[in-house]
Amino acid sequence: MQQIICQCIACGLSDKETAYFLGIEIATVKAHNAKILRALGLIRRAQMVRLVFESGSFDPEMVEREVRRRNMLGHRRKRKGGHT
């Protein structure tokens, strides 16, 4: 999950957009962001994006594949109150 979130950030998606496309909560995206930054010893999202590009691991198609896969499996973001 952290890899796909990292790719979403590198594609320029906001936390809200990433959460929407992946069908997860914004808080989950933010938690993964913090974990990624901590693990890499970074402070800012821009540093993470730069690292993704410089390492050659940028793969915008990964985001598209994951969104398609989740849509095919019927993943939907749950709303408060337990409704989908």
Image: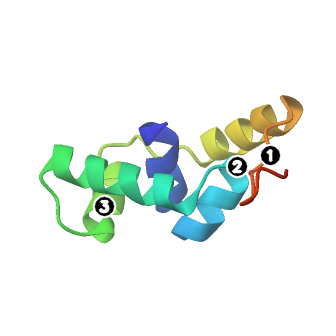
Q: CA distance from mark 1 to mark 3?
A: 31 Å
Can you give x and y, in whole percent of width and height, for residue 56 in the image? 38, 42
Residue under the point 48% across and 52% down: 28
Task: Pick whichever, 13 or 61, lies toward us.
Answer: 13
Residue 66, image quadrant: top right
Q: Type of residue at label 3?
A: Arg
Tell me the crowding category of disc 1: few under 14, some 14 to 19, or many 20 or more residues within 10 angstroms, Cα based.
some
Q: What element does badge 2 sit on?
A: loop
In the drawing, does residue 16 fall left or right of residue 54? right
Q: Are marks 1 and 2 in contact (CB under 8 Å)?
A: yes
- C-beta proximity under 8 Å, tags 2 and 3: no
Work out whether mark 2 precedes mark 3 in sequence or the reverse, and give the earlier one.
2
User: Can residue 12 be seen at all in this image of the molecule?
Assistant: no
Residue 27 versus residue 61 in the image, above or below: below
Q: How many marks?
A: 3
> What amino acid is at disc 1?
Arg
Which residue is at the far front? 81
The residue nearer to you, when weighing 54 against 10, is 10
Disc ID at residue 23: 2
Q: Nearer the viewer, residue 15 or 48?
A: 15
Name the amino acid, label 2.
Answer: Gly
Element at label 3? helix
Q: Which mark is residue 76?
A: 1
| Res. 25 image quadrant | bottom right
Left or right position of 78 against 34: right
Crowding near pointer 2: few (<14 within 10 Å), some, many (20+)? Answer: some
- Of labels 1 and 3, earlier in sequence is 3
Where is mark 3, residue-wise? 50
